[in-house]
Image: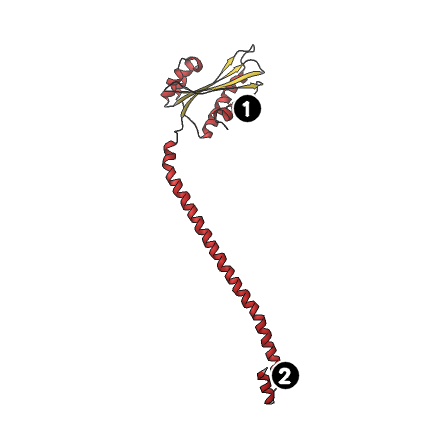
């Protein structure tokens, strides 16, 4: 306003001078909050960047520690891992103690169980079913039943380079009452690694399949 008074003393336009001064005052008042806001936003951005850098550094550190721990455990884990046993599976046979004769459907169901067991054990990754050469299969077919051959199953298993011998039976008490049995034996020692049975009701494809599936999942694999 002093400059405006000087202009008034020299006869210049005072009103214009006052208007310009007020405009400058308003401009300064407007700019101060904006500048303050800009400084605050910049400060917040710096803080966020710092926090992000710290979080990234912490994450990298955690990943490095986990990698070191995993590397230190890998040798012992590999040493502790057990080899997958190789199994020679000799199939299922029927023990018919009922008053009804054995039917073609029952013979077919035995082969159905054979295929199902091979599929389930291979898919589990915990067993390896080894193939049995045709000449060995002929010997097995010409000899006594595997379940009553006085240890011949171990000899056959060793001939096909298997660790264990496996076979199963289906006992038919009647068309309503049957049971499925599964045996797994160490081919070297003769020790039984697994012996379990499950009862089924009904003499159908579905009841046989369901019975073996239950036996494998809940008793052999422990699912």
Viewed as shown, does residue 27 lie left or right of 75? right
- Disc 1 crowd rating (10 Å Cα; few below 14, some 14-19, many 20+) is few
Circle 1 residue: 210
What separation in Å lies between label 1 and label 2 (alpha carbons)?
Answer: 103 Å
Q: Position of residue 97 (x, y in %)?
A: 53, 11
Q: Residue at x 46, y 25 (%)?
A: 118
- Residue 15's disc is 2
- Location of residue 42 in the rendering, given as x and y in whole percent from the top left corner: 51, 62
Residue 220 shows in this picture = yes
Residues 27 and 216: in front is: 27
Query: For this rendering, which residue is in front, 102 or 176?
Result: 176
Extreme right residue here? 15
Q: Counting residues from the N terminus, which is met first, the one under dot 1 or under dot 2?
A: 2
Of helix, strand and loop, which one carries label 1? helix
What residue is drawn where x is 54% and y is 68%?
35
Q: Nearer the viewer, mark 1 or mark 2?
A: 2
Residue 47 versus residue 80: which sits nearer the camera? 47
Q: Which mark is residue 2?
A: none
Residue 189 drawn at (x, y percent):
37, 19
């Amino acid at each position: 306003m002093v400059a405006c008074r000087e202009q008034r003393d020299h006869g210049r336009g005072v009103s214009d001078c006052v208007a310009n001064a007020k405009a400058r005052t308003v401009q300064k008042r407007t700019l101060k909050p904006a500048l303050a806001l800009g400084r605050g936003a910049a400060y917040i951005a710096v803080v966020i960047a710092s926090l992000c850098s710290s979080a990234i550094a912490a994450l990298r550190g955690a990943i490095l520690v986990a990698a070191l721990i995993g590397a230190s455990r890998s040798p012992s884990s590999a040493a502790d891992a057990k080899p997958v046993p190789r199994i020679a599976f000799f199939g299922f046979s029927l023990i018919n103690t009922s008053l009804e004769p054995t039917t073609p459907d029952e013979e077919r169901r035995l082969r159905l169980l054979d295929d199902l067991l091979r599929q389930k054990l291979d898919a589990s990754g915990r067993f390896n079913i080894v193939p049995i050469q045709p000449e060995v299969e002929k010997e097995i077919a010409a000899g006594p039943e595997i379940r009553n051959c006085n240890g011949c199953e171990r000899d056959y298993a060793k001939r096909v380079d298997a660790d264990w011998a496996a076979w199963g039976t289906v006992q038919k008490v009647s068309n309503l009452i049957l049971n499925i049995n599964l045996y797994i034996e160490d081919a070297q020692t003769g020790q039984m690694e697994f012996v379990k049975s499950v009862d089924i009701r009904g003499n159908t494809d579905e009841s046989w399949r369901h019975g073996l599936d239950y036996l494998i999942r809940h008793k052999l694999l422990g699912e």
